[in-house]
Image: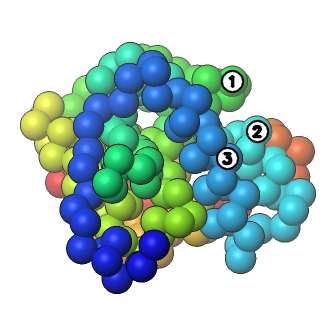
């Protein structure tokens, strides 16, 4: 495909369904494996596959988006009104407690762009969708646990660092950055 022609095709979005899970898992695997290469060692990428991934509760809650271009899966991501900040269905320490929009920050969760669709507005679109949805439910702030490859996007979209984190629960320590933004 001609990249310039593809740039002219609009991005479509919809809420994810359980039927999307296999395709989402494949996209996440590709994104972790390719987009983290400039930032992490092979061991850290392997660890990332353990600590990151899909939290199907986001799909159940109706807060997880799929972005497509011309019918092809380009990215995914969502937000949550629950306490868990990051991680997959298999991550330890998940907390399904509902957040209080008056006092807590909504969570931006599980954002992934297919490596063939980077720098085309996929991530920005997902952030806009998440922020608008959280705002409509009364949240005044959002937080995200950024990977090193995602940090530049979040900074460009107004997120500011709160805390450097290292998660070694997958084996090798993976650097992460907790970030926040006022809505």
Residue 65: x and y in percent read 33, 39
Residue 40: name its quadrant.
Answer: bottom right
Q: Earlier in the sequence, mark 2 or mark 1?
A: 2
Give SS at disc 1: loop
Q: Which residue is mark 3?
A: 29
Distance in Å between CA atoms under marks 1 and 3: 15 Å
Q: Which residue is mark 2?
A: 50
Is residue 100 or residue 20 the one in the foreground? Answer: 20
Residue 49: name its quadrant.
Answer: top right
Q: How is the image coloured?
A: rainbow
Asked whether the beta carbons under mark 2 and mark 1 sit within 8 Å of each other, the answer is: yes
* Vertical comparison of 172 with 123: above or below: above
Q: Earlier in the sequence, mark 3 or mark 2?
A: 3
Distance in Å between CA atoms under marks 3 and 2: 11 Å
Which residue in the rendered view is the most extreme toward the bottom?
4
Left or right position of 182 against 155: left
Give SS at disc 3: helix
- Quarter of the image where the C terminus is located: bottom left
Left or right position of 88 against 40: left
Q: Which residue is mark 1?
A: 90
How many C-alpha atoms fall within 10 Å of the one at disc 3: few (<14), some, or many (≥20)?
A: some
Residue 35: x and y in percent read 63, 66
Residue 109: name its quadrant.
Answer: top left
- Quarter of the image where the N terminus is located: bottom left
Is residue 50 or residue 26 the one in the foreground? Answer: 26
* Vertical comparison of 92 with 44: above or below: above
Residue at 42% across, 79% down: 2
């Amino acid at each position: 495909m001609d990249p310039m022609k593809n740039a002219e095709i609009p991005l479509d979005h919809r809420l994810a369904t359980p039927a999307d899970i296999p395709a989402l898992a494949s996209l996440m695997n590709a994104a972790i494996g390719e987009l983290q290469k400039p930032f992490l060692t092979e061991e850290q990428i392997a660890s990332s596959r353990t600590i990151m991934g899909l939290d199907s509760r986001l799909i159940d809650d109706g807060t997880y988006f799929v972005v497509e271009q011309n019918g092809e899966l380009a990215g995914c991501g969502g937000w949550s009104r629950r306490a868990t900040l990051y991680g997959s269905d298999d991550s330890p320490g998940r907390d399904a407690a509902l957040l209080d929009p008056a006092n807590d920050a909504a969570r931006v969760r599980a954002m992934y762009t297919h490596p063939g669709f980077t720098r085309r507005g996929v991530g920005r679109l997902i952030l806009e969708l998440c922020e608008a949805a959280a705002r409509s439910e009364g949240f005044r702030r959002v937080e995200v646990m950024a990977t090193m490859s995602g940090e530049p996007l979040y900074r460009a979209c107004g997120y500011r660092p709160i805390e450097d984190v290292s998660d070694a629960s997958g084996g090798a320590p993976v650097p992460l950055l907790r970030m926040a933004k006022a809505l």
